[in-house]
Image (spheres, grey):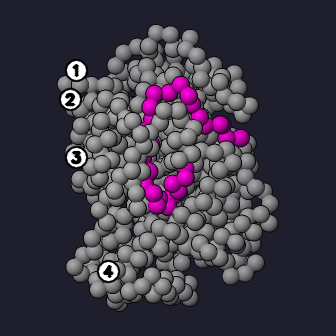
Amino acid sequence: MIRNATLGSAATLITGTLAAGLLLAPPAAAAQTDNGPKLPEVLGVQIAAARAARTGIDWKDCPADWGLEKPIQCGWVKVPLDYAKPYGKTIDIAVDRIGSTGTKQERQGALVYNPGGPGGSGMRFPRRVTTKSPLWVNASKAYDFVGFDPRGVGHSAPISCIDPQEFVKAPKADPVPDSEADKLAQRKLAAEYADGCKERSGEMLPHMTTPNSARDMDVIRAALGEARLNFLGVSYGTYLGGVYASLFPTHVRRMIVDSVVDPSQDNIWYEANLGQDVAFQMRWNDWQDWVAKNDGVFHLGDTRAKVEAKWQELRNKAKAQPIGGVVGPAELIGFFQGAPYYDSSWVPVAQTWAAFAAGDEQALVDAIAPDMTDTKGNAASENSNAVYTAVECADAKWPTSWTKWDRDNTKLHEQYPFLTWSNAWMNLPCATWKAKQSTPIAVGAKRVPPILIVQSERDAATPYKGAVELHRRLAGSRLITEQNAGSHGVTSLQNPCINTRVDTYLLTGKVDAQDVTCAPHATPVAPAKVAALSLDHGTGSEWPAREELPAVR
């Protein structure tokens, strides 16, 4: 779920024919309760899936500018824009794959991946094979690794809400308001953003829902020639997975959900974002404690209180005069929030800050300032944010009363100041959204194979209670808790207690008889000396490439 920019503040081989009886299989969606999909959508996805099964995917070498090397192949799957009108307008979903590396006897089908967001692209997933990521060697013997751009993302009928160069331009206004005038200015920006989404992408907006993305996944499953889906979803991808399991329980084979969104209907999405504010503060405090413990390296304070005071000093300096002319408080939050998100960001964020504190202003500017010449990257960032907004606004009905937004966020900011107002402004366009807003479906399934749930106890982006709630709703699921840890995206970390169970589940379908608690992965080790580092998670044994990480909300 990556928030590199926010609005006015800081800123993812057809193997056979479809199994006989697909069209006659009990439509799981029909079992949904009062807010479930209507019959036209149930029939629409069956029609689209049968059509995709007949057509398959015309796999070819990926376009050169997609950055996906051979032997990764790319293709398209056609889906209805509106599943209630399966013979109406269609859009093309971009997919890619790399074949399993094992023997014919070892192969178990395709493993489909979503990294989160909403707004994240899964197209880099096959690169976990080409880059030989050791955590995925065993799974890649059994599965083709399949990624896709969800509807509205990247190459799949991309949407937009604002000119990308305007979106990334810095500095933006300080997200923490000093006055009612500051709040009014942010409200104006949010309303203008909502208007821009309607103007630039209005036809897509009513259909940018999680249930529709889940239906797209079922069509992808059929196009791949798979009778049942194998799925790995991270962050928002866990909500997508939960919705899929609710709509299509008989189509689930193996499913891992990692860093879990609370799927409760009253949590999607307004309350979910308020909950993030609390959890981010907790993990921000954890990082500050670590920085203080390593004061001999960073010299930013030997207690959390001193590190926090240094942070406020930095914010105030950037507010008085943007650093390098482009780094204000909003840009600082966009950069520093990487530390609460991922342990892999602890060292580079602290080193960059320490270098600045020691007099190297350029280190901070280089790490944070937008590259206005990177038009492709800026367009991708804008698109990701547009999809994030469109999906969350379309999935649920949001409060329209500014009084409620103001009251809730003012109160939260008193105790949890790190992200509260930044988060509020990012989501405020949903208060004046110009397209249909749905009622979230009731996530839950009794007739599914065991689903594996993986969660760190102190996750900032997806608080722990979300994993507990999804576990309760999915009969037979198993929960692996990484105790006293807080990094987002646990399955990409080196922790044998978790890694071996993920492999066992993917290869055999077996889960432990009971839920499991694992010790935390290793805490990041501070370097011997300060040197500003780029925020790059690498492609080695411990961290996936940055573009494969869950999209930060």
Q: Residue at x 34, y 63 (%)?
A: 344
The secondary element bearing badge 2 is classed as loop
Indicate yes or no whether the magenta region holds residue 460.
Answer: yes
Q: Which residues are magenta?
A: 438-466
Camera-nearest label, 3 or 4: 4
First in sequence, mark 2 or 4: give its number: 2
**Residues at badges 1 and 2 in contact (C-beta under 8 Å)?**
yes
First in sequence, mark 2 or 3: give its number: 2
Indicate yes or no whether the magenta region holds residue 21.
Answer: no
Amino acid type of the residue tagged 2 in the rendering:
Gly
First in sequence, mark 3 or 4: give its number: 3
Q: Which mark is residue 294?
A: 4
Q: Is residue 390 left or right of residue 60?
A: right
Q: CA distance from mark 3 to mark 1?
A: 22 Å
Q: In the figure, 316 relative to 234: above or below?
A: below
Coordinates of residue 345 in the picture (x, y in percent) = 36, 66
User: Which of these two is toward me, 65 or 138?
Assistant: 138
Q: CA distance from mark 1 to mark 2?
A: 8 Å
First in sequence, mark 4 or 1: give its number: 1
Residue that label 1 marks: 105
Residue that label 2 marks: 102
Q: Which mark is residue 5?
A: none
The secondary element bearing badge 3 is classed as helix
Amino acid type of the residue tagged 3 in the rendering:
Pro
**Residues at badges 3 and 4 in contact (C-beta under 8 Å)?**
no
First in sequence, mark 3 or 1: give its number: 1
Coordinates of residue 415 in the picture (x, y in percent) = 62, 75
Furthest residue toward left: 103
Q: Residue at x 44, y 31 (%)?
A: 450
Residue that label 3 marks: 134
